[in-house]
Amino acid sequence: MLKLGINDDITNEDYHGDREYESSSSLKLYLKDPKEYHNRYILKLPREEKYKGAYDFGSYIHSLILEPEKVEDEYAIFEGASRRGNAYKEFKAENEGKIIITRSQFLQAQSLLEAYTEHQLASSMIKSGTPEQTLCVELEGMKIKVRADYVKYGQIIDVKTTSDPVDRFAVGKTVVRFDYDLSAALYVDAFAKHFGNEFEFYFLFINKMSNEIEVLKASKNLLENGRRKYKKSIELLKKARETGKYFEEGIQEVDIPSWAVFDDNKN
């Protein structure tokens, strides 16, 4: 069970299973899809199980970089050529509770790890700090939980694997698309409130296709934009909790995007 302050030795399962505290993921979801938030966090409806290949691979890279000592206990390498068939089913059953990584994913991960190790700036960032640090605080009158990839000396480092370009212009678009600005602002504000000093936020992006690595610092504008987002989400959630109304019901109007409007003046 989570508590206010630093929470040591909290597993991913315990962190994500907690429903007392709001997270950056839940705040993002409520801004974008209040009905889905209601289904997932209030009604707690079961979600369809899907193969999470990209997510599992990203978790594997995280562990290799942040907590290599836990890799053997949490992952199992499947030597077969396909996840289909009895051989895979038997291997999965024998390694129940572990995340299954294929041989090809293992080789790809080793290549990425080598690129990370050789990248002096990136590898120097993940030193003399604490990985996977869980913190619970109250912000804007709401209980909030955050789980930072790596924390040290007033810095928060967030490791991201992606197939998209990792230059600062492309990453700016990625930040907006996935609301990483909301996460960054929530994290720096949560840690600043707990420790009483300011924190900087860094993205460590790893392109899993090209092995390209970039370390990028979140700008003041990025953080302020994310701050407006999370504060608005909290405001709306507090109102929903008071009224019991999390989303608008009834018939809504559907429209077409502006680019699809037919121009009858064209030849």
Image: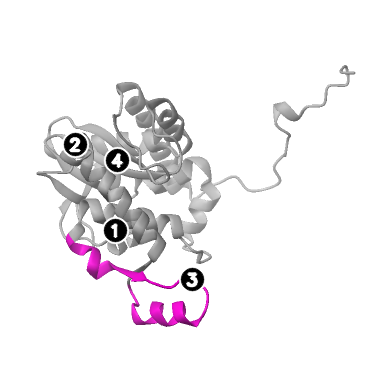
Q: Say whether disc 1 or disc 3 marks the residue closer to the N-terminus.
A: 1
Q: Which residue is mark 3?
A: 83
The spot of residue 250 in percent (x, y) is 68, 48
Instruction: Choose mark 1 or mark 3, whichever is in front.
Output: 3
Q: Which residue is mark 4?
A: 141
Report which quarter residue 233 is drawn in. Answer: top left
Tell me residue 214's x, y (percent). 31, 34
Amino acid identity at mark 1: Tyr
Give the amino acid type for the residue marked by disc 4 in the picture: Gly
**In the image, is residue 20 part of the stretch drawn in magenta?**
no
Name the quadrant of the N terminus.
bottom left
CA–CA distance in space, label 4 to label 3: 46 Å
Q: CA distance from mark 3 to mark 2?
A: 36 Å
Mark 4 lies on a secondary structure that is loop
**How far apart are the alpha carbons under marks 1 and 4?**
21 Å
For the record, the magenta segment spans: 69-97
- Residue under numbered circle 1: 15
Question: For the residue labelled by badge 1, is the local secondary structure a helix, a strand or a loop?
Answer: helix
Q: What's the residue type where badge 3 is placed?
A: Arg
Specify which label sits upstream in the sequence, 3 or 2: 3
Seen in the picture, residue 30 relative to 46 is either above or below; the reply is: above
74 is higher (above) or lower (below) than 66: below
Q: CA distance from mark 4 to mark 2?
A: 41 Å
Q: Residue at x 20, y 34 (%)?
A: 121
**Along the horizontal axis of the image, is 261 left or right of 177?**
right
**Residue lying at 71% horizontally and 26% vertically, measured from the top left:** 258
